[in-house]
Image: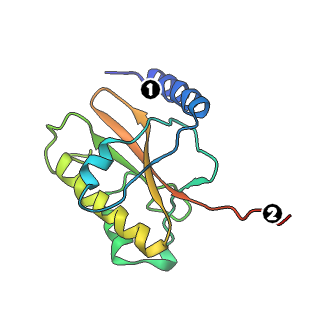
Amino acid sequence: MFSSAQIYSFQQQAARKAARAHRAPHVIFSEDTAFNDWRGAPFLGTYVPPSWSPVTLDRTSETPTITGLRGKAWTGNTDGEALTFFVDTTGVGTKGELAITVGEQQEVAKLLVALSKERKRTIGIALLEVGQFQAVIGVFERSWRKRKSQ
């Protein structure tokens, strides 16, 4: 088992590597490929790429999709808090554990596709922390910047 100091060190190393490589969150495109898309998430650590921002859920705009995401979320249940998921990386987790299992990952991915359609924004996921058997996945949305007129 890794100590919290080791996990923090991994997170910082990943952030530096991600920034140098200009990595961005992995976009989940459709419900059909949701599971495979979930596995393609890059390890960003604490790095937040330009034109991306962490997804936060606002209680004033509650929808069935947001309610479903809140039920599975590790954090993000309070306004302004970034939405993250604690995920089992071994593939042998059982339902009822704290970490989201493989089957539940598909459910969450489908909810993220629905959230993308509701918000009319591109939604992506990335690894924020990695341990021996679990990981923390962050959810990001693409925020398009307007170009300055010349």
User: Crowding near pointer 1: few (<14 within 10 Å), some, many (20+)?
Assistant: some
- Regarding residue 90, the answer to whether it shows in the image is yes
Q: CA distance from mark 1 to mark 2?
A: 41 Å
Quarter of the figure that contains the N terminus: top left
Q: Which residue is mark 1?
A: 7
Residue 13 horizontal side relative to residue 50, left or right: left
Q: Residue at x 43, y 77 (%)?
A: 62
Image mark for residue 148: 2
- At numbered mark 1, what does the secondary structure look like: helix, strand or loop? helix
Residue 24 as seen in the image, left or right of residue 50: left
Look at 26% across and 36% down and name the residue there.
89
Residue 6: percent from the left, percent from the top? Answer: 45, 20
Tell which of 88 and 23 is nearer to you.
23
Q: Quadrant of residue 19?
A: top right
- Above or below, 64 against 88 in this view is below
Instruction: Specify whether 131 is left or right of 45.
Output: left
* Callout 1 amino acid: Ile
Q: Is residue 69 visible?
A: no
Residue 109's label in the rendered image is none
Quadrant of the frame with the C terminus: bottom right
Q: Foreground residue, 136 or 126?
A: 126
Q: Residue furthest right?
A: 150
Residue name at image x 51 percent, y 28 percent = 14
